[in-house]
Amino acid sequence: MSLLSEKSFILENWNIALPVTIILLVTVYLISKRKKTDLDGAEYIGADNSIKTDENCYEDTEFTPSLDDKDHVLFPGAKVVLDGGATKFYEIVNDRRSVRKFSKKPVPFEIIKQCIQAAGTAPSGAHTEPWTFCVIADETIKNEIRDIIETEEYLNYSQRMHRQWTTDLKPLKTNHVKEYLSDAPYLILIFKQIYGIRNDGKKKQHYYNEISVSIATGILLCALQAAGLNSLVTTPLNCGPALRTLLNRPNNEKLLVLLPVGYAAEDCKVPDLRRKDVDEILFTY
């Protein structure tokens, strides 16, 4: 194609060529800006939660540990040992089920507080403890949360979720209506902190924040079960930013899971499921 014909083609199809050109330029600009931002902020936080390895980013940086540099202390090992502890613990957690119908029976807040205190004992990358637990008991706020989630869930079930996904959910009899969000005495919203803030105002790297907060969530589920409470692990798809804004949480926090918590209703029903036997999940070497 000659230069003249190329120009003629562009002129004739300017309404297509112009938007495409603009999109390409904007994309190149955003990519270059993102790379620069990653380099400028690499000593504090990676946007993709990865550990930075490019030491050239740190040439003029004076590093100080986030933790106080104290001497290690002796640890005698686990102090609380129950007779048949492993068996008893299994019996407790094996009784856990996902509950979607809650009783209005009140739950003392002190129990919730103690369970969250237990969750706070979870290990975390470089002991950054990158978790925030927001406990909602106010009826108005619970209803606002339900409105936000049901609006998005209607779109999820009707438009966004793959047909295989919605098909797999049919035996569980779930849909976009979430009565438990307003019925449960408490909602616990668990946020992962993508980064922290140092005393000098600079960002602090939170290593493996999602894994750390997931472990804390697992401990919380066990603590709630041990206290005789029921819960449901939910991941409100596309609702995180709106819920963060509703609760006025900072930008460094992202919603990981939401747990309705309380006592199961007397007429609560759950799917008749079978868990994998230990021989199906355990391999010895």
Image (spheres, helix red, strand yellow):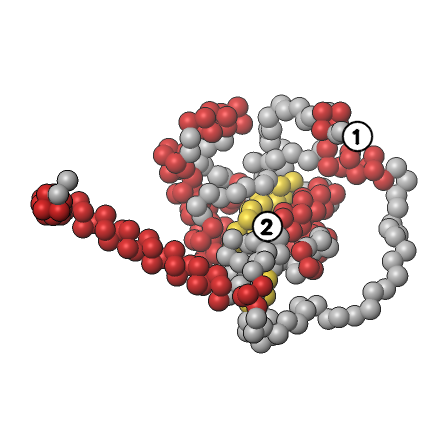
Secondary structure, mark 2, is: helix
| Nearest to the observer: residue 175 or residue 278 | 278
Q: Is residue 38 above or below residue 272?
A: below
| Nearest to the observer: residue 123 or residue 182 | 123
Q: What residue is shown at x 50% (from left), y 26% (from top)?
A: 168
Q: Residue 210's mark?
A: 2
Disc nearer the start of the sequence (1/2): 2
- In the image, what residue type sits under mark 2? Glu
Question: How busy is the neighbourhood of tag 1: few (under 14 within 10 Å), some, or many (20 plus)?
Answer: few
Nearer mark to the viewer, of 1 and 2? 1
Secondary structure, mark 1, is: loop
- In the image, what residue type sits under mark 1? Thr
- Relative to 203, is 165 on the left or the right? left
Q: Quadrant of the C terminus?
A: top right
* Quarter-of-image position of residue 45: bottom right
Q: What residue is shown at x 36% (from left), y 34% (from top)?
A: 159
The image shows residue 32 at horizontal and vertical percentages of: 39, 59
The image shows residue 188 at horizontal and vertical percentages of: 58, 50
From where the camera sits, is residue 1 visible? yes
The residue that label 1 is drawn on is: 284
Q: Residue 121's mark?
A: none
Q: Is residue 163 above or below residue 16?
A: above
Q: What residue is shown at x 68% (from left), y 59% (from top)?
A: 126
From where the camera sits, is residue 265 visible? no
Separation of marks 1 and 2 at Cα, in angstroms: 28 Å
The image shows residue 165 at horizontal and vertical percentages of: 47, 29
Q: What residue is shown at x 62% (from left), y 52% (from top)?
A: 208
